Image (cartoon, rainbow, N blue to C red):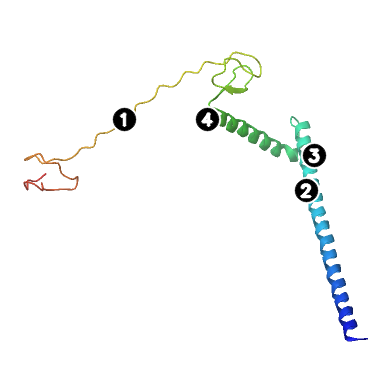
Amino acid sequence: MSFMDSIKSATKSVTNSVSNTVSTGSTKLKLNREVKQTKIAINRTYTEIGKKYAELNRCNPSEEFAEMIVQIDVLNAKLIELDEQINILDGKVKCPHCGKFGNADCFFCSGCGGKMPEITAPAEETPVVQAEIIPSCPNCGKNANSDDVFCSQCGTRI
């Protein structure tokens, strides 16, 4: 075997080894991705089962689930309250007939066709400004700083 043949053989061996390593790594990466996606699908299915159980047994849950059902009800009520606050901040008005929010400039609800309440703009409050009392000299009338004890112009005690 010549020198070139041994270099060729060594190169082929290294190339095969690298190729096998890359192929194994690629296959392992694909398998890990599939494992992760399968776990996500399993968790999604468990969530759907739990949601379906809560919906079907809301009125009569088994003892071990009763507290969780109450917690879901409390969280749903909080979610409704938060959505209402966001709608109000967005300038929307709640329909008194069906509860759907609509733009304040609408006369009728887009959900039920009922008449929307008239909105009157709140009167703007005039901010109360407290006048800052500026001390002045009783002798010459020069304005003084709040921490002055004597007038800087005539020397009279303030």
Q: Secondary structure at mark 3?
A: helix
Identify the image quadrant of residue 130.
top left
Amino acid tagged 2: Ile
Amino acid tagged 1: Val
- Residue at the spot 82% in from the left edge and 66% down from the top edge: 22
Residue 128: mark: 1
Q: Secondary structure at mark 2?
A: helix
Residue matched to label 4 = 89
- Residue at the spot 60% in from the left edge and 15% down from the top edge: 108
Label located before the other in sequence (3 or 4):
3
Amino acid tagged 4: Leu
Label located before the other in sequence (3 or 1):
3
Give the spatial CA distance, label 4 vs label 1: 25 Å
- Residue at the spot 34% in from the left edge and 29% down from the top edge: 127
Residue matched to label 2 = 40
Identify the image quadrant of residue 10.
bottom right
Percent x, y of residue 121:
45, 20
Residue closest to the eye, 127 or 68: 127
Give the spatial CA distance, label 1 vs label 2: 58 Å
Give the spatial CA distance, label 3 vs label 4: 36 Å
Residue 47: mark: none
The answer to whether residue 69 is above or below residue 112 is below
Q: Residues within 10 Å of mark 2 (few under 14, many from 20)?
A: few
Label located before the other in sequence (2 or 3):
2
Label located before the other in sequence (2 or 4):
2
Q: Residues within 10 Å of mark 4 (few under 14, many from 20)?
A: few
Would residue 143 appear left or right of 63 to someone viewing this image? left
Q: Secondary structure at mark 4?
A: helix
Give the spatial CA distance, label 2 vs label 4: 36 Å
Residue matched to label 3 = 49
Give the spatial CA distance, label 3 vs label 1: 58 Å
